[in-house]
Amino acid sequence: MHIKTADVVLFLHIGVAVAAFAVAAVLLVGLSQMRKAENVSVLRSWARVAHRAEPMFPVLVLILIVLGAWLIHLSGGQFSWSDGWVLTAVVGLVLMEAYGGMVLAPAGKKLHETVEAEPDGPITQEIRAMVVNRLVWAGAYGNTGVALGILFTMPTKPAGAWSITIVAVAGIAATALGLQLASAGERRSAPAVSASHLPG
């Protein structure tokens, strides 16, 4: 049996991709559970899970880029950085990293710190607003959609325009879903807000 270096690197690339999607799944489940939480203790437990999982995602994405570059190097010219599906994947991953670093990570850290300092009891409207933050939900789902689009282009290797279209459509559809779920969370908490303002 002869195993090539490229085969091992491809295996690692696929393994890291699976791990990244697993972390994304944990974060999306965490968002859903935090949205449903009725008290701080439940919210805190899921916020801790998200706080531990969040730093793994950008590291895994970075490793994916490095392994992808290695695969291109090992392809002997079969693939190149100028290929449309390669460029689309790189740009998509970089955008995911950027949005995560600028929006998702700070928002997650703020929520974690706020919930850790909050005593057990009903969830305040301030914290509820942080949980259903539209930028967080749009980014969390949008990044996952972009990742799924990139995953589809890896084996199919469509031309540049098609690669961009596939990844963009997947990202936009997932972003729309995230915004819809965030809006549902806002509507769910609205009655509580109204009730809290009713006279004695």
Image (cartoon, rainbow, N blue to C red):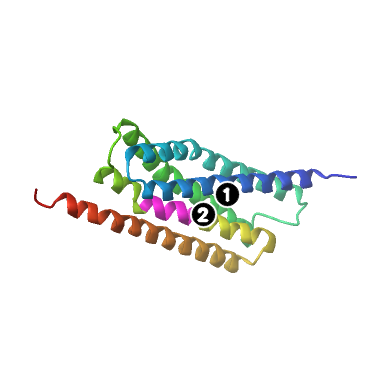
Label 1 neighbour load within 10 Å: few <14, some 14-19, many 20+ = some
* Extent of the magenta region: 135-143
Q: Position of residue 80 (x, y in %)?
A: 69, 55
In the image shown, does 148 or 80 lie closer to the viewer?
Answer: 148
Assign the N terminus to one quadrant of the image: top right
Q: Quadrant of residue 149?
A: bottom right
Where is mark 2, residue-wise?
144
Vertical side of 139 occupied by 120: above or below: above
Residue 21 marker: 1
Residue 76 drawn at (x, y percent): 78, 51
* Residue 163 appears in view: yes
Measure how far apart labels 1 and 2 are at the Cα level: 8 Å
Residue displayed at 40% across by 44% down: 102
Outermost residue toward the front in this view: 200
Disc 1, disc 2: CB below 8 Å? yes
Residue 139 is covered by the magenta coloring: yes
**From the viewer's perspective, is 200 left or right of 162?**
left
The relative height of residue 120 versus residue 75 in the rendered view (above or below) is above
Frontmost residue, 90 versus 20 = 20
Q: Quadrant of residue 47?
A: top left
Q: Tell which of 102 and 57 is nearer to you.
A: 57
Residue at x 37%, y 50% (from the top left corner): 36
Three-letter amino acid code at the position of disc 2 = Thr
| Residue toward you, 108 or 87 | 108
> Residue at the spot x=71%, y=56% of the render?
79
- In the image, taking residue 176 as reference, residue 159 lies left or right, namely right
